[in-house]
Image (cartoon, rainbow, N blue to C red):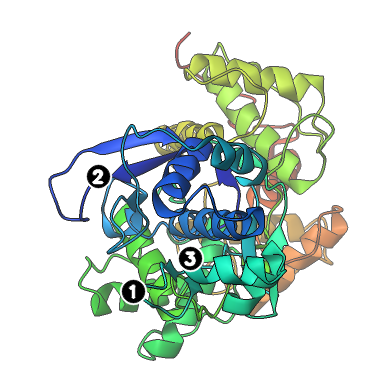
Amino acid sequence: MLTGTPYIPRTITVHLGMPDSAAPNVTVDFPSYIKNVASSEIFPTWSESSLRANIYAIVSFALNRIYTEWYRSRGYDFDITSTTQYDQKFINNREYFENIGYLVDELFNDYVQRQGSIEPLFTSFCNGTTSTCDGLSQWGTVDLANNGFTPYEILQYYYGDDINIVKDAPVKSAVPSYPGIPLKFGSASNDVKSIQIFLNRISRNYPAIPKIPQADGIFDNATEAAVKVFQAVFDLAVTGIVDEAAWYRILYIYTSVKRLAELNSEGVRFEDVAPQFDENITIGSEGVVVQNLQYYLAVIGAYYEAVQPVEITGYFGEETENSLKSFQRVFGLPQTGRLDRATKNDLYRAYMGIVEAVRPEYVSVVLYPGTVLREGARNDYVRIIQEYLTFINQTYPNIPSVSNTGYFGPLTKQSVTEFQRQFGINPTGVIGGVTWDAIAGVYSDLRFGFDKRPYQNPGYVIGG
């Protein structure tokens, strides 16, 4: 969850013992978990201010474990343990105190947060009699409440004046932070931005890991180099690809160096999790992200008979929604017409399957390779786009011709930027699906006199 803003999970999985013990796991709904812990940790006879302060602390502690994926990032299949040696007390199948249950129903989606940070604060606490700690004293809250302290003032007394209580956080089904597909050179997503930010922070403690100059969500040469060094430092296979194992090792080390699971946390700032790319794509959305979605659907629709083709307009209307639903139906996904993570991953897999099946030598123009190309890239797809740009230069001399070297240098970036300006695309000098399709389309029109793009003349259909 570290890649986004916190939310309240619908359920939480509790390990009924020490982390490495063979004890079973139980999954319960989050409010029931909080009622169980509160009924196990504190006494229902305490004053309401004391009870509320303790419930805020219990909720925040649990959310911190989930937000940081503290156990899951280390390979465990649970969110928290039932023992106070590591976490907070949970007694499976116990009954709850009635007044505590009422308070939890009101407070389970409120949590403590350090001002300037977004993560739930690691609200460490102890009973204050048989054990003491730097955080909240449970019995100490009773005295403070009896002296007129409000719940917020009690929390400030133990955790400092610079705290907020976040109210009515949204409730969602928890999903693993790992994006579901490996991140590699040319990937472009908010998950890539997260990895770049994580690695740059880790490099302060492990200076052998090189800094990534642009944490912009595009997996470039610098990102690949940082990933490789991280993998070497932490005994992972040095591939430069962020698979599930690498993702969670990076997440765990990031959590550790920032002390996110400690009371004196360095904190996560909003800009660390602010999305680089819009992911809330549905009816009414528009822009380059919608164009990319439509491009993928157009290609897949040409090769899968049951997937409805769509025009690339940049506006998400009924046609795009119906096309997306038809894709979801073919690939066994819920037919929501929304671009959720599962749909996005299957779109990418289906598209890349077509790219791999359609050999470049058998088509007039080549499909977008599925990876973003920017300055510093070196491969055959750069050479192909250089060839297209040089041909386009014969008709549009303001778009510079470039040598077909396969290396994306400053001159190639200049040519791409001028093409984007000429054809009304944001002039970034970076080639994603929209720019690739535009360059390939203009090249096709100029060279062959009509559109010969593979997704309009596929030659064969999958599932026909």
Can residue 278 be seen in the rendering of this structure? yes
Tell me the element at label 3.
helix
Tell me the element at label 2.
loop
Residue 219: image location, x then y, percent:
51, 64
- Please name whichever residue, 405 or 350, is drawn nearer the observer in this view of the structure: 350
Which of the two discs, 3 and 2, labels the residue nearer the N terminus? 2
Residue 294: image location, x then y, percent:
69, 33
Q: Identity of the amino acid at label 3?
A: Gln
Q: As displayed, is residue 320 above or below residue 122?
A: above
Would you call the spot at circle 2 few (<14 residues within 10 Å), some (14-19), or many (20 or more)?
many
Q: As displayed, is residue 109 above or below residue 380?
A: above
> Residues under labels 3 and 2: Cα distance?
23 Å
Mark number displayed over residue 138: 3
Q: Return the residue at label 2.
A: 16
Q: Identity of the amino acid at label 2?
A: Leu
Tell me the element at label 1.
loop
Foreground disc of the pair 2, 1: 1
Left or right of 287 in this view: 207 = left
Foreground disc of the pair 3, 2: 3
> Residues under labels 1 and 3: Cα distance?
10 Å
Residue 232: image location, x then y, percent:
25, 76
Mark number displayed over residue 131: 1
Q: Quadrant of residue 375?
A: bottom right
Residue lying at 57% horizontally and 77% vertically, measured from the top left: 158
